[in-house]
Image (cartoon, grey):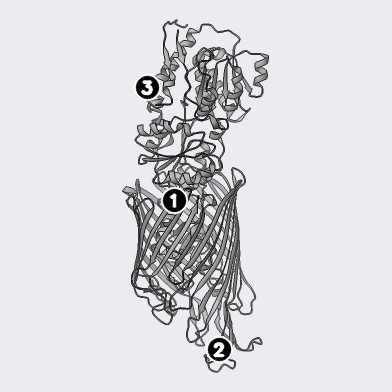
Amino acid sequence: MLIVWLCHPPAVAAADGRQFSERDYLADLPVVLSATRLSQPLSDTPVAMTVIDRAMIEASGARTIPDLLRLVPGMVVGMQTGYNTVASYHGMADRAGRRMQVLIDGRSVYTPSLGGVPWVDLPLALEDVERIEVIRGPNAATYGANAFLGTISITTRHSAVQPDEVKARVGTHGIRDALVRHAGKHGSLDYRLTAGHDEDRGFDLRHDTARSNYATARGDYRIDTYNTLELQFGYKDGDRQRESEDPPWDVRHGREIISRYGQARWRYALDSGNELSVQLYHNYHESDERYTIGPGLPPPALPAWQIPIVYDVVSERLDLELQHTLSPTTSLRLAWGAGAREDRVFAPGFFQGEARVENDILRAFGSAEWRIVEPLLLLNAGAMVEKNDITGTDTSPRLAANYRLWPGHTVRYGISRATRNPVLVEELGYAGACIDPPACSMFIPTLVASGGLKPETILSREIGYVGHLAFGWVLDMKFYRDHIDNLIAVTTTPAGVEDYVNANDALVTGFELALDARLTPATRAVLGYAYADIDSEDKLSARYSVSMPRNSGSLLLMHDLSRHVQASLAYYYRDAMRFIDQKALGAARRLDLRLAGRLPVGRSEGEAALVIQNALDSYDEYYPASRLDNQFDTRVFVTLGWRFY
Amino acid sequence: MFRERSGRVVLRSCARYPRAPGSRRASWVSGLALGGALLVAAAAGPPAPDREVWIVLSENGGVYRQVADGIAATFAGSDAARTTLRTLTRDEFPGAMAGSPRAGLIVSVGVDAARVSATGQGVPRLFTLLPKASFDALTAGTAGRSAPVSAVYLDQPPARLLRLIRLGLPEARRVAMLFGPASAGQLLDFEAAARDQSLTLQAVTITEERQLFGALTRALEGADVLLAVPDPQVFNRHTSQNILLETYRRRIPVIGYSEAYVEAGALLSLYSTPEQIGRQAGEWLAAVGRPPAQRLPAASHPKYFTVRSNRRVARSLALELPADSLLARRLGAAPENMP
């Protein structure tokens, strides 16, 4: 006779085994890493890309997003005042920096009125940022209007993965920052509430103190397995000291800002390859700036002695977008969609006589990612068609082929065309001053836009290489040749009235390199280098040819001294250059140092960090040494924080 | 038709767990168990003609029906096919049992069905589509009762999961794991299996869901991969979002336990489909012959399994994975699957 014994191990899980069942294995789960949430690997992108991740954000010691952008090869960053920073890929920037698209969670934040991005006015805590992707080249098909020289796409952290946190920062130059965040969960809703205060006195010899208070909220609501709703709100107010930048109208005054937004996105993700999303957002930005210029100022024949200057600007943007991502086959991924936008500006000081100016934009876009020969050849194609009130209909196509030479080594050839539509002030601006308000019988214009501008166009070609080398090192190189036509520049009539005209073409050629290297398990180095040559006739004194340094680079070195202590340094270098509306700046180098320690206590963690910004000699930001003294000297600050998990 | 055999073979199949689930000895033992069961069936002689196999479903339809269909499809092609298969739901079972106790073998599908079929004491029972922990809890203290009890678990053996990591992510060495009250019993098995595969386990055990985020942070520090095992307090539909977002942020791939997990964003999942569970149960039924079965093969992890990857996640993490079918084949050749 045969006896088979069946015996049973002790029922270790018996206590909770009653609730535990096959349902725990077979449950439906929401698609978390959906098609639009997954970032493309560098080897698949149609355009060169730099990713600034959370570790880099912390290790850099940066207080602001433009400071982080110094880590991007080819990015020109200049502090025009202590708080107003211009960042532009491949230069060509004046104090506005108009040729980049900037998105925060898909919400476009470049200003429709004057162009550029009011970085300091954005209701956004750097502590809530998950990563910053910088697309180094035109890509309107994916990132929409104004993705001209490049795109900065900021992704904030999902509210489900954030701890409660309090944080305070104190330092030289009047640095006083504070932040408090609460993140929680209520049923299927994950939310976070962040509030903060930022303050500093800017440059020592300038009238540029800035103070801001802000609050942001984000809710991620899971309706069911397939549907999620993401809601975001933000508010910021602040005051900034101002001084007139062109002598002799040297008047110190102030500016008050209010900035707010609301954003809703509904996603229907059927699986990781198929997703439908609808996004609606509204941005509101108000800047109040009024002052008076007094007697003794030219022209000397003025009958009155007090001339009020009103630079109030209210900009609003309402945008609706629908996007559908799908994978009909494993080798083909498609994304298409359409959007409508209304940009509205109320700025009597810039559009004299018109209470409100508007620009309506309709757009349709589509892109395809086709793995023709997996895993060797990938084709990326896309286009955006945009119709706006100023220049009519424009098309921005791009095409790129990524070829894998052998595992881990990919070469890319890409060609892309994009347009930049004039911002409202360039097309419709009409500014000046009434000498005898309120009658205004004598209006002296300073800006009269004649209109009829054509969009700026760029045709960009690049050859890139992405290598995933041994030890997890990633090397990214790009050679490029960009033809830019119809660059808009300021022309001044003999009477001193400004106007915007399509004046210049430029040919930009160069090379860029980025290396992300894990030197040891505890040490990571991120290196960036850019060489650029801009060829332009530089008509109307718009010195495009020197608007970008010939050589520039950065090195971020992060080292874990122990499990809880990290040291990092960031070194930045650039050759001489000049911003479009300014005189030449000399070469500059800067060294930032950071030492940070963490102290876990139960389910919480304290953190202290010491940051020294520019441990080297001071250098000039934006302006060469002049009346406006933007010398960036050593700044030191200490951050203390506590996180609760 | 059958050759009569005499002799006495004692198979202590309890040697298989919890000590060394993936060892060669265990597979040898389980092979013998199945062979033994065949012989037992042969020794049982002509069965009573009217005994039936009852398949008790936790719910009518869905995955439970798929298991039943899998059993029926496999069973239909076998010698034992003359036996009547009767499928009933867990609600119908007590009445049916009281009215016409003709069940010669009860096959339960799911934990709820397993629980009600416990009233069918005295009838051999084969539990399917349930976690090993549930089986252990249900059968605790019943060892040595007359009617045999066995199971085809839903969980994959630790050795198979860790072997998948070695095959799919050859450079990974440190494996993060999170356990909760329901899964903590597997920790030792996983540690032993990790040692066999030269992997280091970074395991953190929690007792309630609110500890999850801190535990996840600790487990992920320096880890190369996160291996998820089901536990209502750890990996569930509410936490999958946090876990997948946090691991993705750290660029740490996740090995999941279901098709849904891989769609949600895990890099790979290793799991057995309801059809595969049904197929194995059907093969066992065919092997033990017509009920009432005197003996059943030892309770074990599923023989058939599926490997599925998320190629989009793999690409995003810049990982080059072998084809799913190749991974499954190479896992199939792993020691614990040899007959």
> Mark 1 belongs to which subunit?
A
Among the 4 quarters of the image, the one containing residue B163? top left
From the viewer's perspective, is residue A550 above or below residue A400?
below
Q: Say the numbered circle drawn on residue A600.
A: 1
Element class at badge 3: helix
Badge 3 sits on which subunit? B
- State the residue in front, A485 or B326: B326
What residue is pinned by disc 3?
A: B25
Asked which secondary structure carries label 1, the reply is: strand
The answer to whether B276 appears left or right of A435 in the picture is left
Q: CA distance from mark 2 to mark 1?
A: 60 Å
Q: What is the distance, in whole Å, between disc 3 and disc 1 at their CAs?
A: 45 Å
Residue closest to the eye, A530 or B35? B35
Q: What is the three-letter code of the residue carrying label 2?
A: Gly
Chain of residue at mark 2: A
Which quadrant would the C terminus of chain B be assigned to in this image? top left
The relative height of residue A503 versus residue A497 in the rendered view (above or below) is above
Residue A443 is situated, as x and y percent measured from the top left of the image, at: 60, 86
- On the question of residue A48 being in view, the answer is no
Q: Position of residue A158 (x, y in %)?
A: 53, 52
Identify which residue is drawn at 52% across, 79% down: A499
The residue where tag 2 is placed is A294
